[in-house]
Image (cartoon, rainbow, N blue to C red):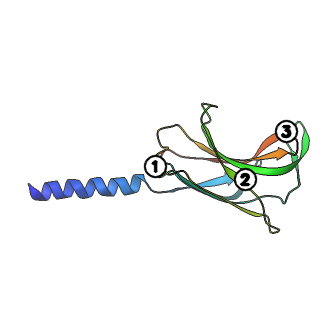
């Protein structure tokens, strides 16, 4: 009886650690090329993004229009519900085009339907924007 209980407790603990593991999400540009990674742990509420972005100001071609981006912003969002979105922070590329965004939200986000991490370029006036990098989060 005691062995069965111990095995059950160990099994539950191990399944909890596997469930809470951070997922590595490829951040893809419009052409499908990987421009970095996002480590996402929805159970713990943490996101760590390391990507390559053109230095600002950057010319952005949306396919229908062109604009000059003056800021990048990262978001955690749901592709099925536009109301489910969390801003993670601004991304400022270095002279070597590297950018990092870290967010520790300290809460379980796994049941809210988040399935994407995006980096969006915005124009100076905020009228134009475009998702320059997108990562799809597999079920956690």
Please report whichever mark, 1 or 3, sits nearer to the chain's N-terminal start. Answer: 1
Residue sitting at 47 percent across and 43 percent down? Answer: 110
| Position of residue 28 in the picture relative to residue 107 (left or right) | right
The quarter of the image holding the N terminus is bottom left
> Going by the picture, which residue comes out furthest to the left?
1
Q: Which residue is mark 3?
A: 128
Q: Which residue is mark 1?
A: 43
Q: CA distance from mark 2 to mark 3?
A: 16 Å
Establish if 7 lies above or below 128: below
Q: Give the quadrant of residue 98.
A: bottom right
Helix, strand or loop status at disc 1:
loop
Between label 2 and label 3, give the one nearer the viewer: 2
Establish if 95 lies above or below 10: below
Residue sitting at 27 percent across and 55 percent down? Answer: 11
Please report whichever mark, 2 or 1, sits nearer to the chain's N-terminal start. Answer: 1
Estimate the x, y position of residue 39 in percent, counting from the top left: 57, 57
| Position of residue 105 in the picture relative to residue 122 (left or right) | left
Estimate the x, y position of residue 20 in percent, counting from the top left: 43, 54
Badge 3 density bin: few <14, some 14–19, many ≥20, Cα 10 Å: some
Nearer to the camera, 102 or 40: 102
């Amino acid at each position: 009886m005691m062995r069965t209980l111990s095995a059950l407790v160990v099994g539950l603990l191990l399944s909890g650690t596997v469930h809470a593991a951070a997922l590595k999400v490829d951040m893809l540009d419009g052409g499908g090329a990987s421009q970095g990674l996002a480590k996402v742990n929805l159970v713990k509420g943490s996101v760590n993004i390391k990507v390559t972005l053109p230095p600002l100001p950057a010319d952005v071609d949306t396919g229908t229009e062109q604009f000059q981006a003056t800021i990048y912003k990262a978001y955690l969002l749901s592709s099925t519900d536009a109301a489910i979105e969390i801003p993670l922070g601004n991304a400022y590329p270095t002279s070597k085009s590297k950018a990092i965004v870290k967010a520790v939200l300290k809460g379980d986000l796994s049941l809210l339907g988040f399935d994407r991490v995006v980096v969006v370029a915005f124009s100076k006036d905020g009228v134009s924007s475009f998702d320059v990098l997108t990562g799809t989060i597999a079920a956690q």
